[in-house]
């Protein structure tokens, strides 16, 4: 055992020594070397002396990830398996089943099968819970079960799944899956083109340019670019997308860091497609990072009008750095700044409150766009036209987070199996059914207030004072449930809209949802109205 441990720890120690030889001798060199030596000694001591057998790789994996979590949520360590998944996100290509899935306890839940891909061809639908893959029962498999659904093209994978209480089985034939950065584009009316941009991978600029050129060929004289829900991705692709609409050589974003080699200015490098076509960009609270570079950059250059609600506020830049044994670390290397000089980072991870959470910006600094309009930093991209419809209420966030809307939609789908291409209608009776479903399933909203109240009761039980506060607790809990009931009524319109979106995806896939949006979405309607009114459009940009 000692011989193996010697091999295991001498090599990392030598590698650590080589690392420090190659770095500059800073004032904190001794402190860093000291802490690494302490950690190495601790790691070896625990492995040698702990009462039970431990898995060194698993222990180190958790230690590294916990250490990095103290910095910000974007600085992450990737083991060999993680690296494969990270490359999939950046390229938009992989071999698998073609579905969005999520692990829930001992099951893999199909969240959304992509039309025409292996999971869809095998008959799997949203809400199906996979419990066995090949000979592997997921109840006994604690690692990343999604890896069991990847492999060489044409590999056959047998799965067992639960649907509406029944256990079924099917065979999935793995195939190449291409994740489109532009999942939909089309004409809103005779003169207005609409492009959905859902990710910034290596195909983003190519797909966006192709969509733009095809729409112009169809008669589009103005364009709506929809960035809602787009979490970002590759910075260069964001710059290149801006380059479709602004002159070559225009500064889109600068990055600044304590490390000078990461200080950079990113300018457009290609000839634009159209410098004058009126442009509206829709954003929401889930539009982040590269989405904010595009919307913020084009806002600062007075090239587009931004519509919707304030974006997420991620002004940090990450870079994946290769390490030994096929691992990587994605490190936050710099902050990015839009052309006006603003950083829209909302959370300050260097300063945390008493609850351990990063402090949110509460003071905003003013900056000027190219034409002198006032814009602000510190909390996402503020739209030129704000719309209440784009914002998500607290109760709606909770319902989505807890999969309540998703699960009700699954139940509704199997109660109404023959909707086909017909757009469902969420009636008042359906909404009453939804509220009854919450009670029947004893759905806990798990709002911060509710969780805090439950935590108080648990502490009271430990201190044996729960009986003395039982009456007050039950009264508070009843009042809280009543307030949640009121919130369900107050936000009925929004929740109905979310239910409808989920149901359209069930019957008509994501394509059907975008087709519905083109004719019925409030933000798209407002953008279309704005672009059709040149005086209003120019007034905002002046």
Image (tube, grey):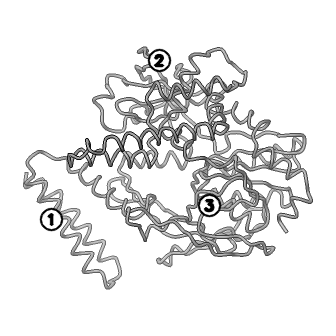
Q: Give how far across and how far down residue 237 sits, in percent.
A: 64, 57
Q: Which mark is residue 164?
A: 2
Q: CA distance from mark 3 to mark 2?
A: 45 Å
Mark 2 element type:
loop
Q: Vertically, is 364 above or below 294?
A: below
Question: Is residue 99 placed above or below 72 in the rendered structure?
Answer: above
Q: CA distance from mark 1 to mark 2?
A: 53 Å
Query: Where in the figure is residue 429, as x and y percent of width and height?
Result: 64, 23
Say which element carries label 1. helix
Which numbered disc, 1 or 3, marks the residue closer to the eye? Answer: 1
Q: Position of residue 239 (x, y in %)?
A: 67, 62
Q: Dot 1, crowdedness within 10 Å: few (<14), some or many (≥20)?
A: few
Which residue corresponds to the image point at 68% horizontal and 59% vertical from the top-left? 294
Of tags 3 and 2, the one toward the viewer is 2
Q: Secondary structure at mark 3?
A: helix
Left or right of 524, for residue 5: left
Q: Residues within 10 Å of mark 3 (few under 14, many from 20)?
A: some
From the image, tell me which residue sits under label 1.
Answer: 41
Q: Nearer the viewer, residue 24 or 357?
A: 357
Q: Earlier in the sequence, mark 1 or mark 2?
A: 1
Kindly report which numbered mark, 1 or 2, lies closer to the viewer in this rendering: 2
- 246 on left or right of 348: right
The reply to whether dot 1 and dot 3 touch (C-beta < 8 Å) is: no
- What's the residue at 64%, 56% (across, down)? 291
How far is disc 1 from disc 3 in space, using C-alphas?
42 Å
Q: Residue 20: give its label.
A: none
> On the image, which quarter does residue 515 sit in?
top right
Q: Residue at x 41, y 41 (%)?
A: 475
Residue 254 drawn above or below residue 188: below
Q: Badge 3 is on which residue? A: 236
């Amino acid at each position: 055992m000692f011989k193996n441990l010697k091999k295991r720890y001498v090599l990392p120690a030598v590698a650590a020594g080589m690392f420090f030889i190659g770095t500059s001798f800073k004032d904190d060199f001794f402190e860093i070397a000291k802490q690494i030596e302490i950690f190495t000694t601790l790691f070896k001591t625990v492995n040698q002396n702990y009462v039970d057998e431990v898995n060194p790789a698993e222990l180190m994996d958790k230690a590294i990830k916990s250490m990095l979590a103290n910095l910000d949520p974007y600085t992450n360590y990737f083991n060999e398996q993680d690296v494969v998944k990270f490359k999939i996100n950046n390229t938009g290509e992989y071999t698998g089943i073609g579905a969005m899935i999520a692990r829930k306890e001992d099951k893999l839940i199909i969240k959304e099968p992509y039309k025409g891909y292996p999971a869809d061809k095998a008959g799997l639908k949203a809400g199906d819970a996979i419990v066995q893959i090949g000979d592997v029962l997921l109840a006994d498999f604690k690692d990343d079960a999604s890896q069991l659904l990847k492999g060489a093209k044409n590999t056959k994978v047998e799965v067992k799944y639960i649907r509406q209480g029944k256990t079924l089985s099917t065979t999935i034939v793995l195939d190449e899956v291409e994740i489109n950065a532009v999942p939909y584009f089309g004409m809103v009316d005779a003169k207005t083109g609409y492009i959905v941009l859902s990710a910034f991978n290596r195909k983003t600029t190519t797909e966006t340019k192709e969509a733009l050129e095809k729409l112009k060929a169809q008669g589009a004289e103005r364009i709506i670019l929809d960035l809602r829900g787009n979490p970002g991705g590759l910075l260069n692709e964001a710059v290149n997308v801006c380059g479709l609409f602004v002159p070559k050589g225009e500064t889109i974003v600068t990055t600044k860091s304590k490390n000078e080699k990461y200080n950079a200015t990113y300018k457009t490098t290609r000839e634009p497609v159209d410098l004058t076509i009126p442009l509206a960009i829709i954003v929401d609270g889930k539009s982040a990072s590269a989405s904010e570079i595009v919307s913020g950059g084009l806002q600062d250059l007075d090239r587009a009008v931004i519509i919707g609600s304030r974006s997420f506020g991620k002004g940090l830049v990450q870079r994946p750095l290769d390490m030994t044994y096929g691992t990587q670390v994605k490190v936050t290397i710099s902050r990015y700044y839009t052309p006006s000089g603003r950083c829209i980072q909302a959370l300050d991870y260097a300063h945390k409150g008493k609850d351990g959470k990063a402090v949110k910006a509460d003071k905003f600094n003013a900056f000027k766009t190219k034409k002198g309009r006032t814009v602000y930093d510190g909390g996402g991209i503020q739209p030129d036209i704000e719309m209440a419809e784009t914002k998500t209420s607290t109760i709606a966030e909770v319902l989505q987070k807890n999969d309540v809307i998703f699960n009700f939609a699954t139940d509704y789908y199997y109660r109404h199996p023959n909707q086909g291409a017909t757009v469902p209608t969420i009636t008042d009776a359906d909404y009453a059914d939804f509220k009854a479903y919450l009670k029947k399933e004893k759905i806990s909203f798990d709002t911060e207030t509710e969780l805090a109240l439950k935590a108080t009761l648990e502490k009271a039980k430990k201190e044996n004072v729960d009986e003395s506060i039982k009456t007050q607790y039950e009264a508070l809990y009843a009042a809280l449930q009543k307030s949640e009931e009121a919130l369900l009524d107050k936000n009925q319109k929004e929740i109905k809209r979310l239910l409808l979106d989920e149901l359209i995806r069930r019957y008509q896939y994501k394509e059907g949802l975008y087709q519905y949006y083109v004719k019925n979405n409030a933000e798209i309607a407002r953008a279309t109205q704005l672009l059709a009114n040149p005086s209003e459009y120019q007034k905002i940009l002046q």
